[in-house]
Image (cartoon, rainbow, N blue to C red):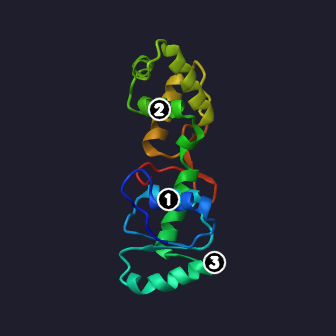
């Protein structure tokens, strides 16, 4: 199968390939794409397609000559991924691993986004259809715990501010005792954070 990753309708080419392979495992597929959207790379990574495939850029001027050899390789169980696409898939993987929202439940994610917009608990409760703003206070506490902000009655404003910063920058941060923010680097080590670079 020769499949564009962007299709009309609800499903992407990657979703379609996964659905087809449920019925016909290891069916050879050559994906091609002009898209450079994180969502496609994320979908490809999560699909778990490990063999009998190729993934190339539609903009590659050699694509017409590559299609038949790529299909033959896929039929024979070999795989190929364009180096530029592989680099983007890995970039998205690293980004996702450091995404603080991935630590939160959907309701917590919604509250965190509204908190980052400067909304009060009462405004968030109204927007989400809760009658009692204390529900939002409890959710805030769950967010602070998930992100290691350890909110107490004495430092709730600081935790709220820090949560807003985390949402706005899309990076999990930790603050040391003197209040200096730190971010995890690609080696998994906490280093000084520079907001201007992030």
User: In front: 87, or 72?
Assistant: 72
Q: How far apart, in angstroms, are the residues tagged by discs 2 and 1?
A: 29 Å
Residue 25 lies in quadrant: bottom right
Q: Position of residue 154 (x, y in %)?
A: 57, 19
Q: Residues within 10 Å of mark 1 (few under 14, many from 20)?
A: some
**What's the residue at 61%, 65% (across, down)?**
24
Residue at image coords 57%, 78%:
74
* Residue 125, image x, y percentages: 44, 19
Q: Which numbered dot is residue 57? A: none
Q: Does any portion of residue 181 appear in the rendered image?
A: no
Residue 29 image point, x, y percent: 53, 71
The mark found on residue 77 in the picture is 3
Q: Callout 3: helix, strand or loop?
A: loop
Looking at the picture, tell me which residue is in the foreground, 66 or 114: 66
Mark 2 or mark 3, which is nearer to you? 3
| Residue underneath mark 2 | 110
Q: Of label 2 and label 3, which has the lower sequence position?
A: 3
Q: Nearer the viewer, residue 48 or 91?
A: 48
The residue closer to the viewer here, 126 or 195, is 126
Q: Is residue 124 left or right of residue 189?
A: left
Total numbered circles: 3
Name, please, the residue furthest toward the top.
131
Q: Position of residue 130 (x, y in %)?
A: 47, 16
Q: Is residue 122 above or below residue 185?
A: above
Of callouts 2 and 1, which one flags the residue occurring earlier in the amino acid sequence? 1
Residue under label 1, please give it: 16
Q: Quadrant of residue 8?
A: bottom left
SS at mark 1 in the image: helix
Q: Which type of secondary structure does the marked residue at label 2 adopt?
A: helix
């Amino acid at each position: 199968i020769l499949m564009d990753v962007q299709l009309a309708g609800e499903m992407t080419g990657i979703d379609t390939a996964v659905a087809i392979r449920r019925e016909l495992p290891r069916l050879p597929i050559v994906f091609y794409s002009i898209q450079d959207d994180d969502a496609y790379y994320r979908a490809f990574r999560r699909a778990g397609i490990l063999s009998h495939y190729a993934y190339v850029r539609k903009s590659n001027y050699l694509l017409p000559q590559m299609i038949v050899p790529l299909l033959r390789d896929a039929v024979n169980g070999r795989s190929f991924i364009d180096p530029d696409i592989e680099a983007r898939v890995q970039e998205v993987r690293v980004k996702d691993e450091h995404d603080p929202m991935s630590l939160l439940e959907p309701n917590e994610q919604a509250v965190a986004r509204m908190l980052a917009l400067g909304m009060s608990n009462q405004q968030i409760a109204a927007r989400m259809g809760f009658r009692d703003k204390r529900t939002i206070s409890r959710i805030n506490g769950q967010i602070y715990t998930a992100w290691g902000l350890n909110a107490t009655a004495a430092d709730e404003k600081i935790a709220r501010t820090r949560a807003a910063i985390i949402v706005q920058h899309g990076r999990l941060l930790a603050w040391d005792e003197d209040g200096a923010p730190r971010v995890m680097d690609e080696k998994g080590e906490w280093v000084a954070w520079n907001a201007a670079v992030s």
